[in-house]
Each structure stands twice: as C-alpha cells, then as structure tokens.
Amino acid sequence: MEEEVEPFYRELPKVELHAHLTGSVSVATMKQLITGKPHLNIKHSMTTIRKGQQRTLDECFEVFKVLHQLVDTEEDLLMITKAVIREFAEDGVRYLELRSTPRVETKTGLTKRRYVETVIEAIRQCKEEDIDIDVRFLVAVDRRNGPEVALETVKIAEDYMLSSDGIVVGMDLSGDPTIGHGKDLLPALQKARNCGLKLALHMSEVLSQKEESELLLTLPPDRIGHGTFLHPEVGGSMSLVHKVRQQNIPLELCLTSNIMSKTVESYEKHHFLYWYQLGHPCVLCTDDKGVFSTSLSQEYQLAASTFGLDQEAVWMLSQQAINCSFAPEAVKEQLQQRWAEYKSQLNC
Ligand SMILES: CNc1ncnc2c1ncn2[C@@H]1O[C@H](COP(=O)(O)O)[C@@H](O)[C@H]1O
Ligand SMILES: [Zn+2]
C-alpha cells in the first residue's frame, strides 16, 4: 500500500486534523498488541479493513471495540500513541491534532485522567526525541455515553487545557452517529466552548442527522467532521449549507473512511467536490488510518487523481489546512514559513 504513493505526496508537508488515536494504530503495532495478548484470541481480520473491502459503519464500531480490548493499560497507550505520531511524521505530516476518548479500565487501573495524562506524556516524549511534528490533543466525547459523561469529559479537557502547555486545545464529538442525540450534549459542548476549548464535531456523517446538525451549528463548532449529508443533493438542506458557509466552518474530509464505511458510494461521488468547488475550506484527513489501511499522503493522491488536481492545487489544499488548525497564531506562522520553503524546493 505504502509504495503506491508517489514521492510528491509523501514529501508534501501535511497537516492532519482528524485522526482518532485508536483507529490510527498501524498493522505493525496491532500485530505487536495481538501477540502480547494471545488470550484475547483476536485475529487480524478483526482489526483492519483492507483496500477494496468495505464494512458498514456499524461493523466499523465493532472493530473499535476489539481495538479497545487490545489497548487497556497505560503502557499500551503510551506505546500506540508514540507509534502513531512517528508514523504520521514519517508520512510527511508536520502538524497533527490527535483525538481520543478517555476510557476507564478497571482491571488495569486505567482512569480517564491517567488516560489523558498518558497521551500528553507520549506527545512530550516524541517532542524530546525531536520527531519532526507538532502534535496537539483533542479530548473526545463519545456520543453514546450521554450528557453526564460529556460534562465530565469537558471538565477533564478544561483542566488539561490549562496544565498541558498548549497540548490540549479542544474537543471532539464522535462515536456511532446512529446512537444518541446532539441536543442532549449541547450544554456540555457550550460549556467547553465558553472555557476556550475549540470544537471539532462529527456532523451529518449519516443521513438522519439534519435536525441535529442545525442545532450543533448554533454553537457554532470550529470545524466539522465529515459533513457528508449537509447539502441538499444528498438529503441535507440549503439552510445547513448557508450556515456552514456564512460562518466559514472548515470541513474535515476523509475520503477512504467514507467509502470503506459505505456512507459515500465512490471516490467520484465524494462531497469533497461539492465544497471544493464552492471555494469552502476543505481539509483532507485520514480519520482512522489503521482501520481503513490508508495514509494522509495517500488521501492527497486519491483526491488529486479523482478530482484532477494539479500539484499547485494540491499544495494549496495542504497549505490552507494550516489556518484551519487549532494551533496558536505564532505556530501557524512558523508552519506557513516552512510550507513556503518546501514549495520553493519542490518547484510546484
Ligand atoms: C468511521 N467514522 C467514525 N465516526 C464516528 N466516530 C468515530 C469514527 N471513527 C472513529 N470514531 C471514534 O473514535 C473512537 C476510536 O478512537 P479512540 O478510542 O477515541 O482513540 C471510536 O470508538 C469512535 O468513538
Ligand atoms: Zn472521525
């Protein structure tokens, strides 16, 4: 898979803004985890969806349950986080926002706070090891767990935003989109926003979420994950499109994820084209690079070949992502400079 990506896409500096930690665990790391826990009797086919294969979104959430069994100690969590960061860096990602849902594992003593602290520790260690990537953390709310857990998670995120030297920058809303309703989570998300946490919310990943998306847009979120069914041609509405455009809310678009989990029929029919043609900020992302056997450079290459983007256009797409990030302004400026240097080297 990796060899299929042309050097231009690998060398292109990239910003990854939508990556779920557990879903980003690579095949090599999964092998290591599976070998270390033979009693779980987990087979490889249960953790990765290979190229050309598809699963329903429901089946994808079953895969996450298996992965969570494999990652149940602080040690595992530290190891996978560092491996995922290294892999993104090797793929040319220079700025990464990782998101993950804090979990409790009573058997091993893992608590939600230790979970967050361990991810932060892994990010710090990578920095000390001089891995060439700036990593931030979005604390995730799993929608299936309801309003109380959401409020508890906001409190945790707020505490670490204040004590992590800028590593925790925001929150994510994710989880099975067919379970729970955004209206119950609105107070928690409002609270997060009010205390200065940025919001990246999965919205309209499935068709039935029109009303919920209207409601979430009142916050408003700082970025939208997927937004597959926002526009009227696929069952969304002009009102949703207007609100997203008016507020200039960037979309995090994950081509392979949507095709493999069958919410989009084919690459050609991906809603990237709709929003890109409107000139709306679109950021290419991987979602779950391990589960969906992809990489960010591969996603850029796929977008370019599917929608006929030349190198200049691909470059602009990658550069535009800097401004959509939750990095402080000074960091954005540094990244812009780096991008400009790369551009003169690549001559595109
Ligand atoms: C495929 N589309 C998707 N839609 C919605 N939520 C998703 C997702 N892919 C991943 N997640 C969310 O990320 C968790 C795994 O990473 P963490 O354990 O948090 O690191 C999943 O349990 C789910 O809540
Ligand atoms: Zn996602």
Image (cartoon, grey):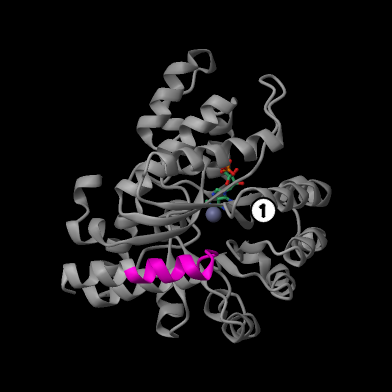
Residue identifier under label 1? 161
The amino acid sitting under disc 1 is: Met
Q: Position of residue 335 (x, y in %)?
A: 39, 66
In which quarter of the view is residue 338 placed? bottom left
Q: Position of residue 83 (x, y in %)?
A: 41, 36
Q: Residue 230 magenta-drawn? A: no
Which residue is at the far top? Answer: 39
Q: Residue at x 52, y 73 (%)?
A: 250
Assign the N terminus to one quadrant of the image: top left
Mark 1 lies within 8 Å of ligand 1 (Cβ measured): no
What is the tally of numbered marks visible in this picture?
Answer: 1
Q: Position of residue 185 (x, y in %)?
A: 78, 58
Q: Position of residue 133 (x, y in %)?
A: 39, 51
Up-down: is 27 above or below 287?
A: above
Compared across the picture, whether 134 is left or right of 235 comes to left
Compared across the picture, whether 91 is left or right of 119 comes to left
Confirm whether residue 220 shows in the render: yes
Up-down: is 68 above or below 281?
A: above
In which quarter of the view is residue 321 placed? bottom left
* Label 1 crowd (10 A; few <14 / some 14-19 / many >=20): many
Magenta span dominant secondary structure: helix
Confirm whether residue 294 shows in the render: no
Assign the C terminus to one quadrant of the image: bottom left
Specify start and end residues of the magenta stretch as a single range: 325-337
Q: Residue 335 magenta-drawn? A: yes
Find numbered disc 1 in the image and state the secondary structure of the residue it sits on: helix
